[in-house]
């Protein structure tokens, strides 16, 4: 088990990405290569997620959840995981 805190990612994202990469790497798959780490850091940034917000649409999973839980069809549809990008 690898514990990663949001605050640590906000403080030094690259360091935390390197920790995760080392943790999930195997003899067959090395995710610690600098190009992989750089790509992961870039695509984990708030600016990237904001620019590509359509990739983070949860509409289908929210519709399924609402139906399974007997909630109104539009319950939770007005909020996204992508907020202001600040901690606290």
Image (cartoon, rainbow, N blue to C red):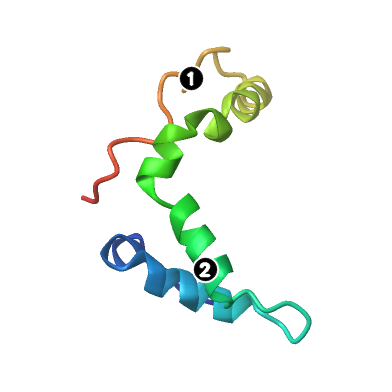
Q: Residue at x 36, y 45 (%)?
A: 46
Judged from this view, the residue extending furthest toward the left is: 88
Location of mark 1 (residue): 77
Percent position of residue 30, x then y? 67, 79
Q: Quadrant of residue 47?
A: top left
Residue at 29% in and 62% down: 7
Work out which residue is located at the far top of the displayed protein and give it. 73
* Viewer-closest of 18 and 1: 18
Q: Nearer the viewer, residue 18 or 34?
A: 34
Q: Where residue 88 sits: x, y (%)?
A: 21, 50
Label 2 element class: helix
Q: Is residue 82 visible?
A: yes
The outermost residue toward the right is 28
Q: Around disc 1, counting alpha carbons within 10 Å, would you say few (fewer than 14), some (14 to 19), or many (20 or more)? A: few
The residue sitting at the bottom extreme is 27
Q: Is residue 2 above or below residue 5?
A: below
| Left or right position of 84 against 76 | left
Mark 1 element type: loop
């Amino acid at each position: 088990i690898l514990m990663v805190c949001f605050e640590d990612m906000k403080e030094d994202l690259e360091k935390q990405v390197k920790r995760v990469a080392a943790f999930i790497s195997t003899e067959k798959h090395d995710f610690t290569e600098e190009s992989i780490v750089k790509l992961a850091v870039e695509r984990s940034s708030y600016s990237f997620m904001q620019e590509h917000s359509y990739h983070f649409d949860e509409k289908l999973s929210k519709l399924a959840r609402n139906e399974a839980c007997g909630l109104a069809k539009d319950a939770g549809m007005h909020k996204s995981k992508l907020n202001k990008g600040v901690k606290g």
